[in-house]
Image: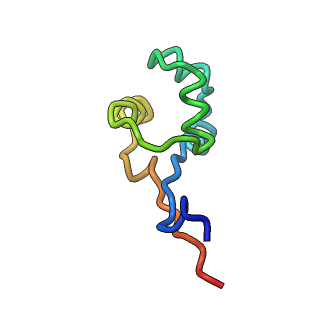
Amino acid sequence: MNKEYAYGRVRLRIEEILRAKNISKNQVCRDLRLPRTNLNRYCRGDFQRIDAELICKLCCYLDISPGDLIEYERPPLPE
């Protein structure tokens, strides 16, 4: 089993929510003054820690709660 995912992982549903609300990544980055590369890393799941301020910004901007944005993926069952 991949040690990195031994306990599962956290996924941010940013792209899904943006599509549902018809908002572009460019618009979010402009409005929240976020570097596009940082937003892309979060969208790809390429992060070790989640920035609480970013979560607050996204939740406020998108009018959602953290539970709408953050999803826990359970690890695969051992074979």
Q: Picture coordinates of residue 19 (x, y %)?
A: 63, 39
Q: Quadrant of the C terminus?
A: bottom right
Task: Say which residue appears at 53% left-offset and 63% top-offset.
Answer: 73
The percent coordinates of residue 26 (x first, y second) are 61, 20
Looking at the picture, tell me which residue is in the foreground, 12 or 8. Answer: 8
Q: Is residue 25 above or below residue 13?
A: above
Measured as percent of width and height from the top left, residue 76 is found at: 60, 74
Q: Quadrant of residue 52?
A: top left
The count of marks equals 0
**Up/down of 48 relative to 29, above or below:** below
How is the structure coloured here?
A: rainbow
Of residues 77 and 19, the one drawn nearer to the viewer in this rendering: 77
Give the residue drawn at x 39%, y 31%: 54
Q: Nearer the viewer, residue 1 or 61?
A: 1
Q: Residue furthest right?
A: 79
| Residue at x 52% of width, y 41% of height | 47
Residue closest to the eye, 15 or 76: 76
Q: Quadrant of residue 44?
A: top right
Residue at 44 percent of width and 50 percent of height: 68
Please state, as top left, top right, bottom left or bottom right, where the N terminus lies in the image. bottom right
Q: Is residue 71 above or below residue 12?
A: below
